[in-house]
Image (cartoon, rainbow, N blue to C red):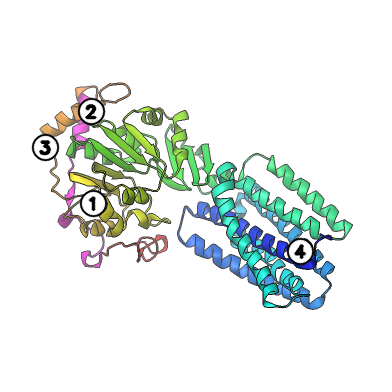
Amino acid sequence: MTKLSLTKKAIILSFLSGFLSLSIEVIWIRLFGFFSGGLPQVFSVTLALFLFGIAIGALFGKRICQETSNSNKLLNEIGKYFLLAGVADLILLSLLIFIPASTVFVFAVGMIICATLRGVAFPIVHHIGTQTNKTGAGISNVYFANVVGSTIAPILIGFVLLGYFTTQTVYLIIALSTMIVSYFCLDDKRNKIFNITALIACGLLLIFPQKLMYNLSNFGKSPDWQLEHLIENKHGVIQVFNDGHGEHIVYGGNAYDGHINTSLFNIVNRVSRAYYPLVVRPDAKDVLVIGLSTGSWTQILTLLPNLESITIVELNPGYTEFKAFSADMKALVENPKVTIITDDGRRFINRNQDKKYDLILMNTTHYYRNQATSVLSQQFLEGVKKSLSSNGIVTYNTTGFEHSFFTAKSVFPYVYQYENMAIASNNPIKHPNEQQLYERLSRLKWQHTQQPVFQTSKDLQRAVNIMKSSAVEFEDIKFRIDKTKLEVITDQNMINEYKYGYFNRD
C-alpha cells in the first residue's frame, strides 16, 4: 500500500476493519444461534462478547500507537494482527470440524479472539489518518469509513453471500479476505511468506468437504441418528435425520420441527392434531397454513372434502426441496389447489386482510425461540382474527406454553385446548358425535391417489376411537400454573422469549 497517501490508506483500512469485523460477527451469530437452537439471547451475548473483544483490541492498538508513530511500522502491525485474525479463524474452524468436544469452548472464547484481533486496527488507522490532518473532517472521514464498512457487511453477508454459499464457505471467504488485507499491509518477507502459506491453507479448506454444519447438527443428538439431508440458505439451516428405525425427523435451525408422517396411527408426531380440524370444520374451503416445515400437516389438510385452496406461507423455501425424497411433499407441491408463498407469516397476514379463510393452521415452533413472539402475541392474533371467515377457526401449537391460551382468550370469545394446540374462533366449536366422526373420516381421500385414508372398517373404527377426544373449553383447561398468574403475550413484553423463556420455563 505504498502508492496511496496515508489518509487514503487509513480510510480504506478503516472501512475494511469495520467490514471484516461485522462480517465475522454475522457468521458467529449464525453459528451460535444454530448451536443454541435459536435462543433469542444469542444476539445479545454475541454482541457483548464482540464488543468486549473490540475493547481489548482497541487497548492493544492504543499501546502500539504509543510505542511508535512511524506509519509504515503501524501498517505492518495492522498486517500482523489481521494475519493472526485469519489464522485464528482457521484454527477455530478446524476445532469445530475436527474436535466436536471443543464446541462450547470455541463459542465461549472464539468470538472474543476474533473481535480482539480485528479490533486492534481501528485505533491505529485513526492515528495514521489524523497524523497530517487532525481537523474534524480528518477524524470524521476515518469514522465514517468504518461505519460504512460495518453497515455493508451484514447486508452483503446475510442477504447475498449466504444465499449462494454455505456458512463454512462464507466463513472461509472472510478469513481469506482478512489475510489478503494483511498481505498488503506487511512489509517484511518472513511474515509475507507465512501469510501466503496461510492463504494456501485457507484456499484448500475452501475445497474441503462441508463438515461444519454437519458436525454442529450431530452435536448432542442420538448416536443412532444419521443426518441424511442438510439444506442451507440465507434463511437458515434445515436438517433431516433418519433415527435408525425408519422415521425421518426434521429440524429447522437445529430445533425440532417434526416427523415426516401423515399416518394417524403413527404417533411419532401426534398428527391427530392436524386431523382434528377435519372433523370439526369438514366444510372448510379456503385454508391458510403459516409454516410449511415437513409438509405432513398440510398434506393432511388436503383431505378436506370441499377444499378449494390452501395457501402456505413459508419463509424458508428450502423446505420445498423435500419433494426430492418425500412423496408427501412431492404430492403437496404438485397439488393444483396448493399455493406456496415465500414470505413472513405475520407480514402476509397484515398485508392480506381482505382475504378470508375458513381455517388457519400454525404448527408453531418452540415458544422460547427467537421471534416466536411474532406468531404468539396478542397483536398477531388480532390480525389473524380479521383474516377468518364468519365461521372460521384458527389452530396453533402452543408447545406447552400456557400463557398462549390466555392470550388467545384476550382476542377470541371462544378458545379451546386440544392436546397442546390452542383452537380459537368467533363462534362455538362443537365436537362431532361418534356417528358424525365415522361419516366425516370415511369421506377422507388422498388427493393425489384418490384412495381412502382409512381403507378398512377396522382402520376406520380405530381412527374414530382416536378422534373421540374432544377439545377442552378454556374455562375447563387444567393449567399447571395458577390461572390468576397467566399473562397476555404482547409484542412489547415478549414473555415467552425472556420472562418465561428457555432459562425461566414454568
- What residue would you read off at disc 4? 9
Residue 478 within the segment the image draws in magenta: yes
Which secondary structure, mark 3? loop
- Please say if the residues under marks 1 and 2 sit with CB atoms less than 8 Å apart: no
Q: Is residue 429 left or right of residue 74?
A: left
Q: Position of residue 456 (x, y in %)?
A: 22, 22
Viewer-side residue, 264 vs 51: 51
Residue, x 23% and y 51% (percent of image)?
385
Q: Is residue 183 left or right of residue 343?
A: right
Mark 1 or 2, closer to the camera: 1
Q: Earlier in the sequence, mark 4 or mark 1?
A: 4
Please state the horizontal and vertical placement of residue 278, each as a whole percent of the image.
22, 36
What's the residue type where badge 1 is placed? Lys
Of the image marks 1 and 2, the number of the one nearer the N terminus: 1
Q: Which residue is mark 1?
A: 385
Between disc 4 and disc 3, whose residue precedes?
A: 4
Discs 2, 4 touching: Cβ within 8 Å: no
What residue is at 76 percent from the left and 71 percent from the top?
128
Q: Which residues are magenta?
A: 458-486
Residue 289 image point, x, y percent: 32, 42
Instruction: Kindly identify the amino acid type of the residue bearing the numbered disc 3.
Output: Asn
Identify the residue position indicated by label 2 in the image.
444
Q: Would residue 285 appear left or right of 400 to someone viewing this image?
A: left
Up/down of 187 relative to 237, above or below: below
Q: Nearer the viewer, mark 4 or mark 3?
A: 4
Judged from the image, the secondary structure of the residue bearing numbered disc 1 is helix
Residue at 42 percent of width and 34 percent of height: 247
User: First in sequence: mark 2 or mark 3?
Assistant: 3
Which image quarter: residue 373? bottom left
Residue behind mark 3: 433
User: Which of marks 3 and 1 precedes in the sequence?
Assistant: 1
In the picture, which quadrant includes the C terminus? bottom left
